[in-house]
Image (cartoon, grey):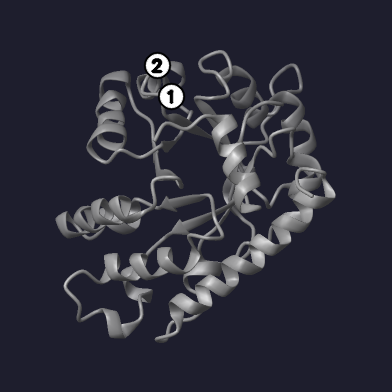
Amino acid sequence: MEFNNQRIFEYILKKQSFLCVGLDSDFERIPDHLKDTEDPVFEFNKAIIDATKDFCVAYKPNIAFYESLGPKGWHSLHKTLEYIPEDIFTIADAKRGDIGYTSAQYARTFFQTYEFDSVTIAPYMGEDSVTPFLGFKKYVILLGLTSNRGSTDFQHFKNENGQELHELVVTKAQQWASPDELMFVIGATHPEAFRKIRSLAPEHFFLVPGVGAQGGSLEGVCRHGMNDQVGLLINSSRGIIFASTGKSFARDAGIKAQELQIEMAKILKQKGFIQ
């Protein structure tokens, strides 16, 4: 399915949710009773998807947890991607970015071999490392202001005009792609920055990690980060998929996902998006 901002917005309204479930499926944390199955990672993901698909609009497999397992991990990823319902947006959380020729191969990997709807990209090497991902009628999700503690090491550096590095990334990248091709990663652990970043990119969707396990505030992000199409995909990974580790893990993941969906529905009503 081809996605654009309007289609994502329509699904948000239909599901009363802008939740993205991160499939950071760490083999070491998968419940023990699954580890004797033929494909423990896929069986885990399948159960999580079955339990959460009614409450989310996106899934985000973190590629590191699959490629670390070698060929069987890539096989699990492929099966997972095929199992995700067609109307749910998929994100390859790969954080790639290299010289143009190499980026073109990464683009083929995630947009043709695995057919994701989007991929996360590191912007440090500039325009020619990003543009090979464009033209597939897919999304590039560019790292803007990330949620990790180390984001303060570089991302707040100011240039001679007082513009912080992450603000320069968000501003410059809009010259390369339209809002229907480009999103930005903006971490929920920086709620004070959302107002400024939204003013710089009023039409773009933001993928927002950091709500839940990392302590980000859903309410704070929505207050400053929403636009007229909602414009947010709020990711929760560990807080949902590892809500528990016993045989009830999928049920408990579904409960956590539903709790977030209910919060999101309230916010959508408060903002006048739904009745």
Viewer-proximal residue among 108 and 268:
268
Amino acid carrying mark 1 in the image: Met
Residue 51 position, x and y percent, is 46, 69
In the rendered image of this protein, does residue 146 appear above or below residue 105? Answer: below
- Dot 1, how many residues are within 10 Å of its Cα: few (below 14), some (14-19), or many (20+)? few
Determine which quarter of the picture holds residue 217: bottom right
| Occupied quadrant, residue 120 | top left
Mark identifier at residue 125: 1
The residue located at (68%, 36%) in the rendering is 156
Tell me residue 93's x, y (percent): 42, 46
Nearest to viewer (mark 2 / mark 1): 2
**Who is closer to the viewer here, 225 or 157?**
225
- Secondary element at tag 1: loop
Q: Residues within 10 Å of mark 2 (few under 14, many from 20)?
A: some
Lateral position of residue 263 relative to residue 21, left or right: right
Label 2 residue SS: helix
Q: Amino acid at mark 2?
A: Asp
Furthest toward the top, the residue is: 175
Label at residue 128: 2
The answer to the question of whether label 2 and label 1 lie on touching residues, with beta carbons closer than 8 A, is yes
